[in-house]
Image (tube, rainbow, N blue to C red):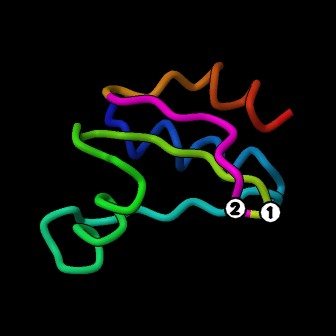
Amino acid sequence: MKATSIVDGIQSQSGGEVDVVHLNLLGRAGREVAAAYGVRVIPATVVFDQSGNTLYRHNGFPEAERIRESLA
């Protein structure tokens, strides 16, 4: 299963409560966001609350259960 499948699955299971954004880290915007949040490994998963605070960060293949826990 691809990393995008995991986070997209969490979005679809959330009933519209979660928005998922995928960034191409090779593009200009992606590089800027990666630098701002210290992303150096692909894939990387960062979960923010509504105020922009980081709830969860993981470098490497995402762990669905940990992401769900951070959203609870």
- How far across and how far down the image is residue 41, in percent? 23, 37
Report if the CB atoms under discs 2 and 1 are less than 8 Å apart.
yes
Callout 2: helix, strand or loop?
A: loop
Q: Amino acid at mark 1?
A: Gln
Is the residue marked by circle 1 packed among few (<14), some (14-19), or many (20+) residues within 10 Å? Answer: few
* Quadrant of residue 23 within the rendered picture: bottom left
Mark 2 to mark 1: distance in Å? 6 Å
Q: Amino acid at mark 2?
A: Gly
- Between residue 12 and residue 23, name the one nearer to us: 23
Residue occupying the point 39% across, 46% down:
4
Is 11 left, or right, of 43 in this rendering?
Answer: right
Count of labels shown? Answer: 2
Q: Which residue is mark 1?
A: 50
Is the residue marked by circle 2 packed among few (<14), some (14-19), or many (20+) residues within 10 Å? Answer: few
Whether residue 18 appears in magenta in the rendering, the answer is no
SS majority, magenta: strand
Q: Quadrant of the N terminus?
A: top left
Residue occupying the point 36% across, 37% down:
3
- How far across and how far down the image is residue 17, in percent? 82, 58
- Between residue 1 and residue 63, name the one nearer to us: 63
Q: Quadrant of the C terminus?
A: top right
Q: In this rendering, is residue 62 above or below 23?
A: above
Residue occupying the point 79% across, 64% down:
51
Callout 1: helix, strand or loop?
A: loop
Q: In this rendering, is residue 52 above or below 57?
A: below
- How far across and how far down the image is residue 14, in percent? 79, 48
Q: Which residues are magenta?
A: 52-59
Q: Which residue is mark 2?
A: 52
